[in-house]
Image (spheres, rainbow, N blue to C red):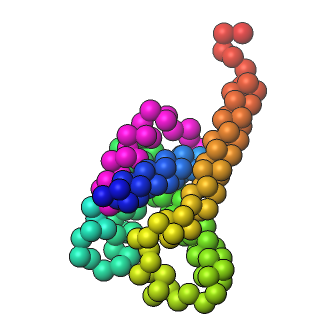
Amino acid sequence: MFFSILLILRNTVETCCLLIIGGCTAKKILPISKILPLSIIYSIIIMLIRMLPIKFGIHTIISMIIMIFFFYNFFKLNINQSAIAVFTTFVLLVAIEWLNSYFFLNLLEGLSLKEMGKAINTPEMFITGLPPLLILVLLALVARISLSRKLKSINESIPNKSE
């Protein structure tokens, strides 16, 4: 039970970062007040989907569809922006997690993917999953700060109609 709560918390932080980065991809700063509850809901839905007896990879497609739905309905992005935001964030997530897995597979001296899969629900493997999360948090912060500065400079350069 404790490990499930940790996974939901980790997934919530990861989802917050993905939503922030996806919003920045669409050149829109998403409100944190909407991101946090949606991240919790999304994390719970994804945990439930992962418990279903479906083939590996299908849950990823379902999660991408749900995230497109969130971007479209809750953040009012058009469907193209939503799809681009989701695909960009998922490619980024796959790349970061692949690099992390590659690093830890080499660090653990030839641990096979099958053996790594058996150990995935252990605290040690939870800890090895933290570097991608930290990278995502850093990327989300940098993306949000740089987009807000860019949008602020654009707004300042547009002359005010009242002048």
**Along the viewing direction, whichever of 43 and 25 lies nearer the viewer:** 43
In the rendered image, which quarter contains the N terminus?
bottom left
Q: How far across and down, in percent of the image, does residue 138 sit?
A: 65, 50
Bounds of the magenta span?
Answer: 26-47
119 to the left or right of 104: left
Q: Quadrant of residue 111?
A: bottom right
In the rendered image, which quarter contains the C terminus?
top right
For residue 48, say whether it is visible.
yes
53 to the left or right of 148: left
Q: Which residue is at the far top?
A: 163
For residue 82, say whether it is visible.
no
Q: How far across and down, in percent of the image, does residue 141 sit?
A: 64, 44
- Tell me if residue 114 comes above or below residue 92 in the rendering: below
User: What residue is shown at x 54% (from left), y 64% (from top)?
Assistant: 127
User: What residue is shown at x 74% (from left), y 31% (from top)?
Assistant: 153
Q: How far across and down, in percent of the image, does residue 92 sit?
A: 58, 64
- Tell me if residue 158 comes above or below residue 13 in the rendering: above
**Along the viewing direction, whichever of 159 and 138 lies nearer the viewer:** 138
Q: Quadrant of residue 29?
A: top right
**Along the viewing direction, whichever of 140 and 22 lies nearer the viewer:** 140
